[in-house]
Image (tube, rainbow, N blue to C red):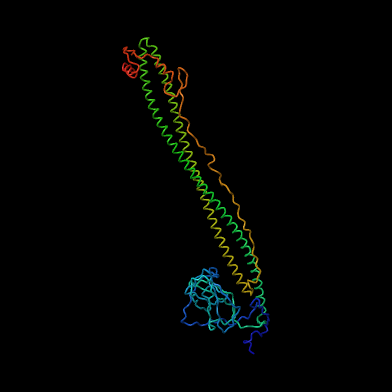
Amino acid sequence: MPANKWPWLEPSRIIWKIHYNSSLGVCPIHMKQWNEMQTPIMEKTIEDPPTSAVLLDRCHFSQVIFNSVEKFYVPGGDITCYYTFAEHFIPRRKDWIGIFRVGWKTTREYYTFMWVALPSDINNKSAKQQEVQFKAYYLPKDDEYYQFCYVDQDGVVRGASIPFQFRPESEEDILVVTTKGKVEEIEQHNEELCKENQELKDSCASLQKQNSSMQAELQRKQEELETLQSINKKLEQKVKEQKTCWETELLQLKEHNLKVSSENEKMGIRVDQLQAQLSTQEKEMEKLVQGDQDKAKQLEHLKNENDQLFLSLTEQREQQKKLQQIVEDMKQKETTAAKKQQELMDENFDLSRRLSENKIICDVLQRERERMERENDLLKKENSRLLSYMGLDFDSLPCQVPTSDQGGAGQNPGLVYGNPYSGIQESSAPSLLSIKKCFTCKSDFADEICDHTLEQQQMQTPCLNCPICDKTFPAREKQIFEDHVFCHSL
């Protein structure tokens, strides 16, 4: 027998007999073909399917689910691929299903393919099993591991099946020919894969714990956000009420200021009149001093009246100063109210800014959670692929799912910054009325003339005599008498 036809009979090779493990579906060590795989020649008239250079990490394998995939198929016969669409997935005319060797990187590495037939009712959301049949002529002829992949018309993989082989049915015992070094290398590789699998499990458990903590943190942030929103609404309502109250007070202060200004103008006119009257009386006094001694009583009376006018003018000036001080106080209160309003607006803006920051943090946490979920899915799929490569079933392995306490964050009722309006007190303007005092009888009066002065005026003679020309005027013509005496001084 020639050595090139039976290479395993050479002294450097060892024959290994390995028991077939039906629970795993594949042998840990299988016979590798010595010749390279020959790609079947497709007919020139068949249109090439749409492919792309999209890598595995950008594909979505959960939108098409392959059902009833065998562990191996017997060569020489047609095979039927059964699959089901996900709820939100919509197939298109250029979608296709290809057979890929395990370990492929892009959709351009397909071995053979078949176009997908569109279902009769595309909009029907109920999951209905679809099928496509591959002819035996185009199927692989080696015993490598292959899998079905659903590729859409954009060249993106939407679903992948479990690996399978093309080999004849065998008995429980399989005769495998290989070298001892190859066996040791494969065993070492299996140990490394087991270690890597354990590391992936630990990493998956850690990611699940992180996901649980992130969800709890997200719940707490959402509750804080709701609390801040309620506080913001309360503050806005209080600001509106306070603003309305301030506007009312401001209108009242303006009205009061107008009244005070009008009274001040009237007092100024009265002061001018009194000053003119005082000037007139001074001139009369100068003329009366030069008169007879008989008019001394009348001159003394004029002097007393002049003193009263001086005192009244002084009081009126003091009252005018008080009114000016009240006006200044009103202006200061208005300025203080405007400052408090600006502080409240600044506080409201600060709360709005904090609310926006919390929203941004919430969005960042949400995106981080989604990213961790995607990484977790990728790790699970990689683990499943490794287990399939090792000949293990992912569903038969023990799985530990960490539990997390969904405890809500405590809410802190009440205001964050306290009540900013507790110190505001209403102020009222002081009374503008003043009490006068008579210098003769020492009694208080609120009118222009004291009762004692009125009695003295009623007791006087009904006639008025000019001290210069001795002309007599009736008592009711007092103003004419004063003008007459004033004319003598011109």
At x 52%, y 37%, the residue is 425
Q: Quadrant of residue 467?
A: top left
Position of the C terminus by quadrant: top left
Residue 470: x and y, percent? 32, 12
Quarter of the figure with the N terminus: bottom right
Q: Where is residue 2 shown, x and y percent of the image?
A: 63, 89
Question: Does 293 sit above or below residue 263?
Answer: above
301 and 450: which is toward the camera: 450
Q: Residue furthest top?
A: 293
- Give the x, y percent position of residue 413: 58, 48
Q: Looking at the image, which is closer to me, 100 or 486?
A: 486
Nearest the eye: 70 or 431:
431
Answer left or right for 358 relative to 304.
right
Count of marks, rendered view: 0
Quarter assignment of residue 221: bottom right
Q: Quadrant of residue 36?
A: bottom right
Q: Is residue 484 above or below residue 108?
A: above
Please determine whether, in this image, residue 29 is positioned above or below residue 448. below
- Find residue 460 and report its horizontal and vertical position in percent: 39, 14
